[in-house]
Amino acid sequence: MKQMTYDHILVRYAELSLKGKNRSQFEKRLQHNVRTALKTSFPEVKVKRSFGRMFVQLNGHDEQGVSKVLKGLFGIHSISPALKLENDIDLIREGAVYAIKDALPAEKGTFKVTSKRIDKTFPVRSQKLNRELGAEVLKNTKEIQVDVHNPNVELRVEVRQDGTYLTCRTEYGPGGLPTGTGGKVMLMLSGGIDSPVAGYQMFKRGVEMEAIHFHSPPFTNERALQKVKDLTKVLSRYAGTEIRLHVVPFTEAQKQIHDAVPGEYEMTIMRRVMLRIAEKVAGKRDALALVNGESLGQVASQTLDSMHTINEVTNMPILRPLVAMDKQEVIEIAQKIDTYELSILPYEDCCTIFLPPQTKTKPNRNKANRFESSLDLDAIVKEAAEGTYEQKLSSAEELDKEFEDLL
Amino acid sequence: MIYFDNSATTRPYEEVLETYTKVAHDFFGNPSSLHPAGKQAERLMNQTREMAARLLDVKAKEILFTSGGTEGNNLALKGTAVRHRSRGKHLITSEAEHPSSFETFQQLEQEGFEVTWLPVNKDGVISLVDLKEAVREDTILVSLIHVNNELGSVNPVKEAGNFLKQFPKILFHVDHVQGIGKVPLRIKDSGIDFCTVSGHKFHGVKGTGLLFAREGIVLSPLFSGGKQEHQLRAGTENPAGAAALVKAMRIHFERSAEGNRKLFSLTDELIASLQEIEGIAVNTSANRAPHIVNFSVPGVKPEVLVSAYGEKGMYVSTKSACSSKEPEPSRVLSACGFNRDRAASGIRVSLSYENTDSEIRTFLHYTKEIVPSLLEVVSK
């Protein structure tokens, strides 16, 4: 008798069912993303779509490892490890006991069995199958009981032509839309707590993403830049692919702004310049929107007056997924997506380094334009955009090149 | 040389030594320094920690690099006892622990803690029933060795962890020094709060180790003076040692599935053949790790046998303290209930993945020769 062990994972789609005619396109994209996410660590898995859901055939790979990856992919509503068995009542009995013991390892709790007999040539009818499997589980476990109304676990059995599928345990994915179905955006990534969360929220809507960071050496140091690279790597987990990070040399621009602009408008003008540069880089990369981590009223630069004044310089859409969130909500997401610990590392970033003693909380467009008039904006933007270099970062690259052979 | 003393220490892998020297030479900056050399060393430490976490399937912030098994055990035990003494002063461990735990508990006893010493059976393992009975309202810590360093027997730490999950105030430490890679142990979600690992037991270098300390657990540090290792172990980090440890662990894990199968077949053969030799009693039970076999030749001082093997280039060990003229019986073997004669004559054979079938045969061949002749001398 073969050792029972989960050999498939059943994947249920999130919002895809709502998508009408586009549905199959979304499903195909999700299938592609699942394949891409699994191929390096789990080369033997097969990913198939059938009956409005997806099966990942494990072919010997570790169920927990594969599940962990799947649980991070957008477009996935939930997953359940599944046993595929021949349509043989003895095997199904054995499988039922295995699945219940796996879902209730302490052998305590309640369950129910829900059978579907799609293959009508199978001799045992579904009601009878429910009872038989229930009895088999009760016989082979200690303190597990039946509860058909509110069970701790539900054992689902589907007898199909190609075999019988048993699932019991269900875990949830992040929902949302599959990455790559929503066009490209450029994320303004500072290294703080908010911007990585903003990026994550956008992934949920299926976008492709590149990131832009403003680096001002020696006022911001290498550790700060490294932190942003590490954050990008973490985000690339949710992208399911590598992310291009554009690093803008910003020292010169900041110095010029610092010299020419009164302290209380420095932040406002700096933001306006950053937006102009970001727009330029985004344009080069065919991104259709900018994304940032602004939350209304959180700091001086994020009041409605500020946003209004800063936003003047571009007509590219600026998406602010955190705009109505509290700090605490943002922190909770940051913790969940593993960016929090990195974000709180205490390095200076470009927003804090030249921070004047007072920042205007209600700047206006007229004044901003007036203060900017003494700057050669075109030259500043051009120089920064041209000096920008990019680096592709991926969570799959565990180690820096120089350490690769060491560990 | 036939080296059968791998539970004492192992020969470092070449790749591990390469890592050690390369890191010590190329990345010698202090990870806490602000300049680029410091940043690079810090970066290496971070990636090393990340890799260790990945290998053990835990979080990077749950990995603390130490100087080895003794420090890991001391830090987990004393750190918990001191930090949580206001919660209660009752500790639980077994009679068959490694000295670095055993004597730590003795010290804690002198400092006013109450220790329940769980007995072990003939196989060298505790009973869960005893553990369940020992738990009290004021218990703050349970510590168990996973694979016994003298006998190779395997304690039911998985079951103990599962049981202890229902007592959130009781912290559970596992001394995993002999077990790592050899006997699978899932740390995550297992009820384990601390887990001690030592590098030189799996072909790393000496003076390296790590302690898993579950996220959210607080400890009192043994060393004060800096913010290194999540503020739990002051002192300049040892990037070369940490990297070497992780390299060794990675190689060890890569080899462990096949290696353990091979070791079981070698030690099965060894045990079966030893049992046929008159005068030899095998102490290791069926519930065992793949790499350790302990046997006694009652009547023969183990030191004599160790040196007889040594002359032939075969290195085994005895765990009895050979300091006094009076042969001190092994504490572990005594705890298993073996009589004084047997407990005082234990020999430990401990293998690594490098050992071969022909080495076992050579060893057995000589054992068949030397044991009867020594017994003859003794019986006169």
Image (tube, coloured by chain):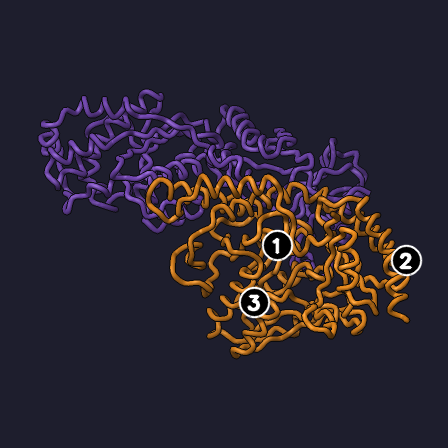
The Cα–Cα distance between marks 3 and 1, rounded to whole angstroms, is 23 Å
Asked whether the viewer can see residue A402, the reply is yes
Question: In the image, is B226 to the left or to the right of B12?
Answer: left
Q: Amino acid at mark 2?
A: Glu
Quadrant location of residue B140? bottom right
Q: Check if mark 3's residue and mark 2's residue have beta carbons within 8 Å.
A: no
State which chain is coloured purple: A
Which of the two marks, 3 or 1, is nearer to us in this view?
Answer: 3
Residue at the disc numbered 2: B276
SS at mark 2 in the image: helix
Q: Where is residue A221 drawn, in percent x and y?
A: 30, 39
The Cα–Cα distance between marks 3 and 2, rounded to whole angstroms, is 47 Å
Asked whether the viewer can see residue A95, the reply is no
Q: Amino acid at mark 1?
A: Asn
In the rendered picture of this protein, how many numbered marks are placed on residues? Answer: 3
- Choose between A244 and A71: the one closer to the eye: A244
Q: Which mark is residue A152?
A: 1
Quadrant location of residue B335? bottom right
Q: Where is residue B71 drawn, in percent x and y?
A: 53, 61
Which of the two marks, 3 or 2, is nearer to us in this view?
Answer: 2
Q: Amino acid at mark 3?
A: Phe
Q: Which mark is residue B167?
A: 3
Q: Where is residue B85 drawn, in percent x and y?
A: 48, 73
Q: Quadrant of the N terminus of chain A?
A: top right
Q: Are marks 3 and 1 on the same chain?
A: no
Label 1 environment density (alpha carbons within 10 Å; few <14, some 14–19, many ≥20): some
The Cα–Cα distance between marks 1 and 2, rounded to whole angstroms, is 54 Å
The chain that hosts pointer 3 is B
Taking the spot 28% from the left edge, 33% from the top edge, the residue there is A214
State which chain is coloured orange: B
Vertical comparison of A337 with B285: above or below? above
Q: Check if mark 1's residue and mark 2's residue have beta carbons within 8 Å.
A: no
